[in-house]
Amino acid sequence: MRAEYTAFCRSLPWSVEPHPGWQAREGVYSHRGDVAASPGYTGEQRRRKAAFERRLRQLAAVMSGHPFWSTVEREQVVAARMALKRVSAEEVQG
């Protein structure tokens, strides 16, 4: 889910709202240089991004509140959650 969300966000324009962009000024440091105009997000892009974010929040709440975590020693909870983040879908499905 997170990978899909990340890929979707990378496909979006850089600005939510339409913006004319700008040219980098001579002598002023900018890691981006010139920035092209942005058309802003479409209504569909806004809805899809909001749906992704809503679902990610729901999943985070389910994961963090799952009864399993009460079975893990308190000192090991962070390490266990970090290990879980690195489990691939293939490993879960067997």
Image (cartoon, rainbow, N blue to C red):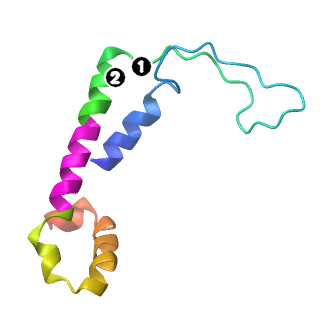
Residue 62: within the magenta? yes
Amino acid of disc 1: Tyr
Q: Residue at x 22, y 87 (%)?
A: 73
Q: Is residue 55 left or right of residue 76?
A: left
In magenta stretch: residue 39:
no
Tell me which secondary structure the magenta stretch mostly adopts. helix
Q: What percent of the width, then of the height, locates residue 56?
A: 25, 46
Distance in Å between CA atoms under marks 1 and 2: 6 Å
The residue that label 2 is drawn on is: 45
The answer to which quarter of the image holds residue 21 is: top right
- Highlighted magenta segment, given as a residue range: 52-63
- Counting from the top left corner in percent of width and height, residue 50 is at 28, 31
Q: Quadrant of residue 9?
A: top left
Report the amino acid beneath label 2: Gln
Residue at the spot 15% in from the left edge and 57% down from the top edge: 62
What is the number of the mark on residue 41?
Answer: 1
Residue placed most toward the observer, 44 or 3: 44
